[in-house]
Amino acid sequence: MSKKLGLIVPHDYKLLSIAAILEVFETANKLSPPSEKPFEIMIFQSKEQPDQGNLFGYESHSIETSEINLDLILIPAFTTDNMSEMIKKNRNFIPWLQKQHRAGTELASFCTGAFLFAASGLLNEKLATTHVDACSAFTKAFPMVKLKPDETLTADGSLYTSGGSTSTFHLLILLIQKFCGNEMAVKIAKIFSIDLNRYKQSYFSTFRPNHLHNDTLVAMLQQKIESQYHTIEKLEEITKDIPTSARNMTRRFKQVTGIPPIEYLQNIRVESSKKYLEQTQLSISEIIEKTGYNDPKAFRKVFFKMVGMKPIEYREKFRVQ
């Protein structure tokens, strides 16, 4: 019997995410005999959305009036960076997701879809991941979720999440394997050229400093770190003229940026080293010196921790030819 698969099409959905999800499950159906299609694919929206009717070749069902009990619900990624506003616009989905899960439905989110998923409370005390560059905002918004920023995907009971971009396909393969078996999963992986051995997403991350705040002291320290990172030996050197105690500065800095000053410095240095590895012929030793590290072993340790691979491996993978 076909599994009832519900794909929500919320406000601010990312079309590429919807397309990838539909393409994979439709391909699984096409590879199966007509009488044995593994999935009955359905689209769900809220009645307040303007684009009701036929979407992507499927009839749109209303979450407010539908009585269909689903086997699996999929939450796509979003186009907006304003996640609080997105959740507000899509608040009608939350009680529906909760009700479906209580009835035994499994749920999966892709990339930033995890924000709407987490807003339902269903991920509290559960493992989850999201787009690597959205992890800081996610942690602040949902501290009860056990976020795994480096993971390509997570599976915690009947709840699944994936990281950014191509991580979508890794979760889709996992779901195909669960509902259709290994043979179908391998076929899908080959058709879409999916690397089944990729487990981490950290090396795709880009550190983006948060300057959207009104704390002048934190902004002062950020500017000092970003402009002097290659010469700083001790943070005390650049904080001594900031009119507050070191303890208070660290507390305020972490509250505003999400990380302490020393980790901020490390991120700035690693991001700089990544650019050197991508765009120059400089040796690793030269890059270490240019980014402010005195100890090559310490640099390699921090780089591996933050990026998920060695500097030479990063250069081989991302070098601009």
Image (tube, rainbow, N blue to C red):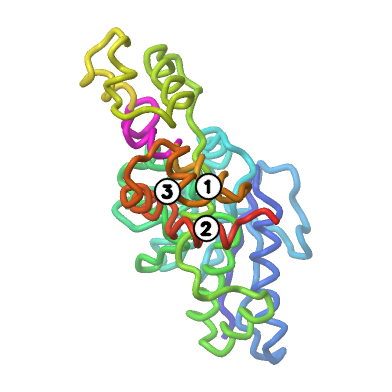
The residue positioned 78% from the left and 65% from the top of the image is 57
The image shows residue 84 at horizontal and vertical percentages of 50, 34
The image shows residue 193 at horizontal and vertical percentages of 65, 75
- Please say whether residue 317 is one of the residues in the magenta stretch: no
Q: Quadrant of residue 30?
A: bottom right
User: Separation of disc 3 and disc 2 at Cα?
Assistant: 32 Å
Q: Could you tell me which quadrant the N terminus lies in?
A: bottom right
Q: What residue is pinned by disc 3?
A: 118
The span picked out in magenta is 254-268
Which numbered marker is on residue 20? none
Secondary structure, mark 3, is helix
- Few, some or many C-alpha atoms within 10 Å of disc 3 (few <14, some 14-19, many ≥20)? many
Camera-side residue of 176 and 267: 267
- Reading the chain from its start, which is encountered first: label 3 or label 2? 3
The mark lying in front, picked from 1 and 3, is: 1
- Please say whether residue 258 is one of the residues in the magenta stretch: yes
Camera-side residue of 45 and 185: 185
Secondary structure, mark 1, is helix
CB atoms of marks 2 and 1 within 8 Å: yes
Q: What residue is pinned by disc 1?
A: 274
| Location of residue 187 with respect to 18 vertically, above or below | below
- Few, some or many C-alpha atoms within 10 Å of disc 2 (few <14, some 14-19, many ≥20)? some
The image shows residue 94 at horizontal and vertical percentages of 48, 47
Residue reaching furthest top? 243
Residue 137 shows in the view: no
Residue 228 shows in the view: yes
User: Separation of disc 2 and disc 1 at Cα?
Assistant: 8 Å
Q: What residue is pinned by disc 2?
A: 314
The residue positioned 23% from the left and 19% from the top of the image is 246
